[in-house]
Structure formats: C-alpha cells, structure tokens
Amino acid sequence: MDASIMALVRRYLPPGAKLSVVAEPYRKAAVCVADMDGDGIPEIIAGYKWEGQPYVMIIKHYNHTWYKAATIKGLGYDITYLNTALVTGDKAMDLLIGWQTGAIWSELNIFTYTDEVLNKVVGGVYYSRIEVEDMPGKNGKDGKAEIALWQHDTGEAYRVDVYRWEDGKLISAPDVYPYYFKKVAAYYEERVKEEPQAAFYWYYLADAWLKAGMPRRALQAVDAALALHSSYPSEKELLALKEQALSKSRMRNVSLYPARIKEVGGTKWGYINTMGNFIIPPEYSYAYPFQENKLAIVEKEEGSGIINEAGKFIVRPKYDFIQPFSEGLAIVQDKSGSRVIDQQGREITAKPYAYISSFQEGRAVFQNQRMQYGYLDVEGREVIPAIYTYANDFQGGYAVVKVKEGEYALLNKKGGIEERYPYAFVGTLGDGLLAFQETEQGKYGFINKSGQVVLPPSYTGVQPFQKGRAIVNVAEDYHNRYGVIDKAGTFIIKPQYNDIEELGEERFAVGIPVDEDKPFVGSKYAIYDTNGNQFTNFIYRGVLPYKEGLASAYDDTNTFFINTSGRRASGWPVVAGMGTLSLEGEVIKANVDQRISYLNKAGETVWRENTVIPLGGTYEVQEKKYKPNKDYLVYYPQVSGITDKNIQASVNAQLKKLSEVKDIPADIQLDYNYFGNFDVPFFRKHLLVLKLAAYNYPFGAAHGMPTEIYPHVDIVSGRFYELKDLFRRDVDYVAVLSAIIEKQIKTNEKYSYVWPDQYKGIKPDQPFYVDSDALYIYFYPYEIAPYAAGFPTFRIPYSEIMDIIDTGGAFWQSYH
C-alpha cells in the first residue's frame, strides 16, 4: 500500500487504535482504495481495532480535502477480510467485510455506500475462507464478482459453494462450478497421496471430481476406494457413487454435438453429427451437450428449455435457468425461485425455494426464504428440516452443516448428528479429514472425523488433500507463496510460486508470474509430479486436468495435448491459437481463439464455424481474423460483391477501423486483454446492419468494459448512415425520441433498473440500430443504469414515429 495512503489512514485512527491485518486474498493491512459511490473519485477504506472492538471507516476526498465520511462498529473481535468488488451492481464498488467471530469463523457482511452511509445488504453468512473474483461460466465472465465461501467441516475438509448476487440476495452460482471446483478437487487429490490406504479419502476425491465435471477421474478414485475393502464408506455407498461416475463418464453413444453458425439475424446454435452435418437445425441462442438421458438444455429468447434427440421440446423454454440433470432430476429457476423437475419435465417440489443444489446421494440442499438450510429427497420432500445456518452436499453418506456460530456438525442421511465440532470453521468431510480454523482470523489446519487435530493451523490458505498432497499458501506479504505438502506437513514443492493447479494423475501445473511486478497478469506453468519432480520448464500458458493420460495445454502459439511427462503427445492434433481440446465421443472438440471446431483423431476437420455469411446475390460478409498479440484478438467483417471496388475498399477500411484493427506490438506483455467479434443482425435490400461487439479487460481489474457499435452500411453507395439520416430535416427528432424513451422508463416495469433522474434524453448521435419493424435506441453501461444491466435498449416501432421519418430519404429507401 502506498506510504502516503497509509499515513493518511493513521491520521484518522482514534488514539490507541491499531490497523487490522487480513489474511485474504493475501496477508496485508486492512486498507483498500476504491470508488464506492460511483462519483469517479476513489475512497479509502480502512479496518482497525479500538478498545477491543473492530471498526471500519471510509475516508473521502472532496474539494481538495480528505475527511472521515463514515464509520461502522463491527462484529466479533477483529477483521479477517476487507475488499471491494462489483457484487450487487455495476457502477459503484460494494464493500465486503469478514468479521472474526470465532477461532476459524468469520461473518460476511456486504455494504453499499450512498450519500456517505454504509447500507448492509448481506449479513449472517459464515465462512472460514473466502475468494472473490469474476468467475467464468458457460459464456465467460459477466463482469460481476462471484463469492466462493469455504466452510470448515471435519478433519481437513471444507464445504464449498459459490454465490452471486441476484434478485436482492446471494444465490448459488452453479454455472461457474466447472471453473471453481477444479480448485476444490485439487485439495482432495493431495489427501489420498498422504494416506493412500484411507478409503474415505478416495471416496471424497471421487465426489469432488464429479462436481468438477470430471467423472472419469471420479471413477478411478472410487475404484481405488473399493479395492481397499474398508467398512467406511460402505460398499453400498461406494457402488452408488461409482454408478454416478459411470453414468456421467460413458460415451453415451454420442452422435450429436452442439455447433453454431453466423447468419443474417445473428449467431444460432444447433446440433451436428460426426460427419459435420446439422441434424437439429441451428435455431437456439445457446445449446448445451446432450446428457446421458438423451436430453439437452437449450436457450431461446423466451427462456431455457429441454429437448430430446429429435429436437422436440420436453420442457418448453420458460425458465430463466436449468441445471444439468443429476440422479435423474434437474433444478430449474425462474423469478419465483428454484424447483425440481424430473426427466419428463414435471415439477416435483410443492413450492419454490430460494436455492436448491444438484442432487447428491439422494439428497439436495435447499435454502428457504429465511436463509436457513435443509435437505430434500428425490421425491421433493423436506426430509431434513431447514434449521441450519449452512449445509453442504452429502458425500459418502454424511454431510457437514453449520449449527450455529462456532459449532458444526456431521449429519447422516436421516438427519442424525454423528459428530459435533466446536470450531469457527469446519469444511466438508473428505478422505476422512476436514479443514478447520480455530478462530475466524486464524490460520488453517486439518482435523479427522472425530475432531482430533491432524495438522495444526499453520497456513494462510489451503486446498483439500487429495492422494496425500495438499496445495497450501504461506503468504506473509503481498505475494502468493504456494507450495505442496504431504500429510506430515512436509513441503514436497516449496512455497514460492504464484499459482499451483492440481491436474490429477499425480501431476501439478506450477506457475511463476508472467510479470514479477504484476503477478495478477497471470502465470507461466511447468509440469511437476506429486513427488516434487519438475518435468518441463515454465512454458505453458494454460493446462487442463489430465484425462486418461492426456491433458489439454497451450502456449503463446498453439493448443495441443500433453502426456504425463509434460511433453506434447505424439499422434494427436495441434491447433494454431490458444484454447482447449477435449475428447467428445468419436471426435475432438477444439475451442481455440474463441472459435469452435470438431476434428477426428487423425486431426482432420469434421466441422468448423462458417467464415462467410451470404447476403443474397453477389453480396456476402467475410470474417477476418486479426491477432497481433496473444492478448489481442479481433474477428472483423469485410464485405465483398460490391460492384464499385473503390467503394468496397472504402467500406472495408472503415469496418476495420471501427473493429479496432490497429497496430499492436507483438512481443510485449499488454496490460489488458481485448476480444472483438461481430454479427449480422439485419440485412434488407441494400442496407447491411452489423453488430461490432468487444470486451476490454485490464488485468487485475474487477471487470472489463464491453462495447457495441452498429454500423448501418449502404452496400450500393458505401454510405454509413447516422441516426439523423432517418428523419426529416425540419423536425426535432432528438426531442421526440427522448420523450418516447422517458415514457417507457416511467411506465414499463422492465426498465425499473434505470437510475432515478439519470436519464436526461438522447444525444443527436445516440447509438442505435434498425430492423424491419422498429428503431432501437441503446445506452452504454453506466450511462443510465448499472453495469449489470448491460446496454439498456428501447424499442420504438416505426408506427409511433412515421410522421418524422424521411420516407423519401436515402436511409429509409435503402431498406424499403
């Protein structure tokens, strides 16, 4: 922290007060700087202890003067976490505070800051470890932070869930599970390395991999547990888990694969066969892979639904979100809450809940409107009442719940309490161990199922043991110091790295910073084994977990498979660009440089996304790629078929400029990542409307900034039309359109997110686009609404404004 900021903070501390020190996201003074009220001027937030009580104050700058604007008295006896992030909105940062209320427990509070008042929007949420970041889901990052809460269970295990803010509360975020639970699974891999004869470690390792979406690895782990012939977990439980792993890992006779095409009207998804032919036409806004039950979740404009392999809807697209099926049941969500449906689409729960987890071992965690947790059975009945402040999934016949502050319990499937743990935090049971903290601000260690301490608290951060190894962090300064320990606490890999990821099959990806002065930019990885042997140099930019001896990896140039020695696997395809490869039945799916293709195992292309969009006649739009730097990628449109080649060249030069195709150094590390893409939402007669979308993410920022531009191109004259060109010269179109939009904001509930009094009308050159029926006016994030609102858009039918449209003008005539 800058010395001048620290000096300023100390000036406002009460006499005798002492700044708190937080351990997460790394050990540092409890001071941060962020724009809390959205006025563009950062505030200073500081946490301290005074007369035995924790406090947080906000120091604000106004008219060349700093002053203490707000102070709150906290809970417990210290502060374990102090950070800012975009959680509830998209304009101003929220304040996240972890109050230390027990040895290994903290209570999370989230505050908004308006008119120099801190308003608490979240409280009563307890955790032992917290991670806050914008996590990627199925469509990448959304610009808002998710919150991962690790709750100490038994031994060396944590109960982990990931939350996001939605509809005025924190709800589970299952769409980011595939990203985050890879970290959770890595924890249990290390445990089985330490105690390979402990069947329960293998059991929980298998369960962790299932949640991480890696059922083949789960199958290997559960087979290891069965081979030990242990009484715990029981053979019945292990076989049930094995059936889940088999169900999810079978090839399922996969014959249909999701694929997308660009066409006039936008990007659409459908399903192809192994020959690359569309069997289910591309008519969805998004399409997920078919599951074991031969059903697939799809999205349309009206919502999410479920289809069979004939493309028929089993569940109409009416839900906001649908989770994949688990144990024959799926969780659906709409504005009223979450429910459970069966494979016929029937809702089996009697009422909606605030949250329902996927089913595990015949049980699903639910949360009621009072933020209390219980369990449903496969009939949708509340078999364990909602009396707990937190609850984890069942694993191996047991689940860890939080009874109250400073007390956790281990439940059996009937709801009976097997063990109690008097700690601030206890994680989920895994490999017979649970991670724990004695105090909320304290360090982490591990206990066994009976509550006996196996490894005393000595780490600032830990991941679950898996196969006798655990990734730990011992940071005592502002930089990560990740390493790997065995069950005796001996370091197998020294704690000196920026990042370590568990890859399975007794391998780690160990990372050093790309830029020592900016570790948040990312890591370069080397492959290590679980005995600490280094197999490669630090040459990879990304590595996925191993599956059957292969892992997808990429460097600055290519994407490929590596073998367990960390070298490129011979006989497998190499694809130019950065991304991932995955085995999908009979084909290999390549998602490289933001484009999807399918290959056969000889490396021959079965299907790839189209790069030409026919417009009719000789006209077409061609997709071009510009990638001068590994962190700068643009797909931009070029029009062909225009008779006058000078006009065509002029049009294409302007499209390149609007798409940000510009000189970018190739051999330097940028401070940001930039991705540009385009669609063709509308074409008629000789008017081409393009959508140029981009996302600029400064490394280390809470989120990036999206942009959208809609060029309206006359492909005969080469003219780029502006908003004013649609209207007669003798009318004040700005006033007319502004009044229409103001009325929509005031009368249409869908625009309730617009900030009061922020809308002041449109500009003469306001961003817009047209289609056959209406004019659309839109605003950028933060202009009149929060970041989460995206681009607020207002539809104005031509019938409302025909009296001011220049129907004889070139713009109108270009598509009429």
Image (tube, rainbow, N blue to C red):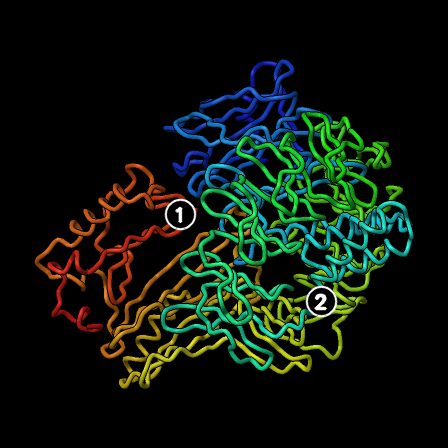
Q: What is the x, y in percent for residue 360?
A: 69, 48
Question: In the image, is residue 608 above or below residue 514?
Answer: below
Q: Residue furthest left?
A: 730
Q: Is residue 658 left or right of residue 736?
A: right
Front of the two marks 1 and 2: 2
The residue lying at 13 percent from left, 67 percent from top is: 807
Residue 789 numbered mark, or none: 1
| Residue type (three-letter) at the residue carrying disc 2 | Arg
Residue 250 numbered mark, or none: 2
Give the mark nearer the N terminus: 1 vs 2: 2
Can you tell which quarter of the image residue 785 is in?
top left
| Residue type (three-letter) at the residue carrying disc 1 | Ala
Can you tell which quarter of the image residue 637 is in?
bottom left
User: How packed is label 2: few (under 14 Cα within 10 Å), some, or many (20 or more)?
Assistant: few
Question: In the image, is residue 26 above or below residue 531?
Answer: above
Q: Are marks 1 and 2 in contact (CB under 8 Å)?
A: no
**475 or 508, which is in the foreground?**
508
